[in-house]
Amino acid sequence: MAIKSTSRATTKREYHGDVTLRYALAMSLNNATVKLAEEVGYDKVADLARSAGIASVKATPAMALGAYDATPVDMTSAYTSFANGGTKLSPVFVIPCAIPRATSS
């Protein structure tokens, strides 16, 4: 997929022309992520984010920039979808347990 994009606002304004989605994400080309979300549909992108565990997201252009709150646990859960073939896993918390050391008599 090719997307027209300009660079981040924090750097000098550059036009990158048509770029791949991989390049746009790697280079943080915000214009490209907003354009992609617009083309796919903000509602669809928000639904996907919610199904991945990010409950606070709303279907707006800001969503494509990651502008909504999410806890580290929410993000950990959401990212499991990438590593697990599209299936979300819920994090499991492990309570530390310790066995007292034996003392010599």
Image (cartoon, rainbow, N blue to C red):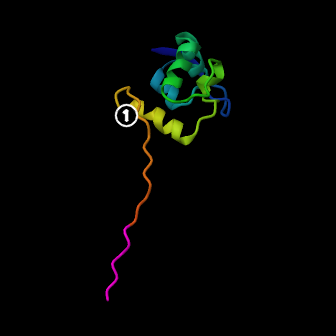
Q: Residue at x 52, y 36 (%)?
A: 75
Q: Secondary structure at mark 1?
A: helix
Q: Residue furthest front?
A: 105
Q: Is residue 98 visible?
A: yes
On screen, residue 6 above or below 99? above
Q: Amino acid at mark 1?
A: Ala
Magenta-tinted stretch: 99-105
Magenta highlight: main SS: loop
Provide residue 45's location: percent of width, then percent of height.
53, 18
Q: How many marks?
A: 1
Please tell me in which quadrant of the rendered image residue 100 appears: bottom left
Residue 66, by quadrant, is top right
Residue 102 lies in magenta, yes or no? yes
The reply to whether residue 7 is visible in this rendering is: no
Q: Position of residue 55 (x, y in %)?
A: 58, 28
Taking the image as shown, residue 82 lies to the left or right of residue 59, namely left
Q: Quadrant of the C terminus?
A: bottom left
Residue 101 screen position, x and y as percent: 36, 75
Quadrant of image for the N terminus: top left
Pointer 1 residue: 83
- Residue 37 included in the magenta stretch of the image: no
In the depicted view, which residue is nearer to us: 86 or 5? Answer: 86
Residue closest to the eye, 51 or 82: 51
Label 1 Cα crowd, 10 Å radius (few <14 / some 14-19 / many 20+): few
Relative to 97, say whether 33 is above or below: above
Q: Nearer the viewer, residue 59 or 29?
A: 59
Quadrant of residue 56 within the rendered picture:
top right
Q: Is residue 80 left or right of residue 25?
A: left
Q: Residue at x 67, y 34 (%)?
A: 10
Q: Position of residue 26 (x, y in %)?
A: 50, 31
- What residue is rendered at 56% in x and 20% in y? 46
